[in-house]
Image: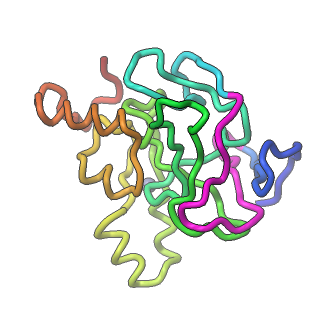
Amino acid sequence: MTPHKRQTPSHSGLEVEFSPGEYQSSLKSRKAFKSGEILTFLQGLTRSRKAYSTLQCGIGPDDHVELNSDFLYVNHSCDPNIAFDLSSSDTSKWHVRALRPIADGDRITCFYPSTEWEMDQPFQCECGTKLLHWSFVSVLLMTCSKSCLGVIRGARYLSRKQLSARGFINSWILTLAEHRDKTKIDQPVASQNKGL
Ligand SMILES: [Zn+2]
């Protein structure tokens, strides 16, 4: 789609592609990244109330941050190519990391439940439609391990197996999922969008 708006990129090698419509814009790479490469360390984050634009950064009710950069435009995918790693107790080490090779022109995507226990705004994921363009073997592999999960409500509504298939999940999400499964007092409820 042709960008209709331009701005100075907040990070070199990345550019926002603005598209008409709510939540249609996306962040694209303008260079190649290797698997495991750090795209950037996250700077300029500010604490905020939970919102569609924030990242959860811990287990507490106030552990949410605004990115204040072009990374706001990273869309969700059930087969993500980057992860926001905010697991370190040293916030200067929080970073964005490539989970697999990223080519120049690729859309940057992350798995929202890797940070979000409960999404502020659940939504219907349509990343699965892209699988139609992939090779048969890729489709088969994706079907087995990382098929589209449909409505994304947050990690609370996913099994630990579904979470671990996504390459990287932040520590507090794994802690919460373990606690949920151990106590069996907070089982996923498919029809429930909000909790707590
Ligand atoms: Zn999906």
Q: Is residue 135 left or right of residue 192?
A: right
53 part of magenta stretch? no
Marks counted in the figure total 0
| Residue 15 percent location from the top left of the image | 78, 52
Image quadrant in which the C terminus is located:
top left
Query: Residue at 19% across / 27% down in the picture?
Result: 186
| Residue 87 percent location from the top left of the image | 45, 37
Colouring of the image: rainbow
State the extent of the magenta-drawn residues as a range. Answer: 21-44
Question: In this picture, is 41 found above or below 39?
Answer: above
Q: Nearer the viewer, residue 171 or 159?
A: 171
| Residue 59 percent location from the top left of the image | 37, 24
Query: Residue at 73% across / 36% down in the picture?
Result: 69
Q: Quarter-wise, where is residue 171 in the image?
A: top left
Q: Nearer the viewer, residue 126 or 81?
A: 81
Overall secondary structure of the magenta section: loop
Image quadrant in which the N terminus is located:
bottom right
Residue furthest toward the bottom? 136
Ligand 1 shows up in which quadrant of the image? bottom left
Query: Residue at 47% across / 15% down in the picture?
Result: 62
Question: In this picture, is 74 found above or below 147?
Answer: above
Q: Is residue 89 left or right of residue 15?
A: left
Q: Nearer the viewer, residue 85 or 137?
A: 85
| Residue 55 percent location from the top left of the image | 53, 31
Query: Residue at 39% across / 83% down in the picture?
Result: 137
36 part of magenta stretch? yes
Q: Is residue 140 left or right of residue 79?
A: left
Q: Is residue 133 left or right of residue 184?
A: right
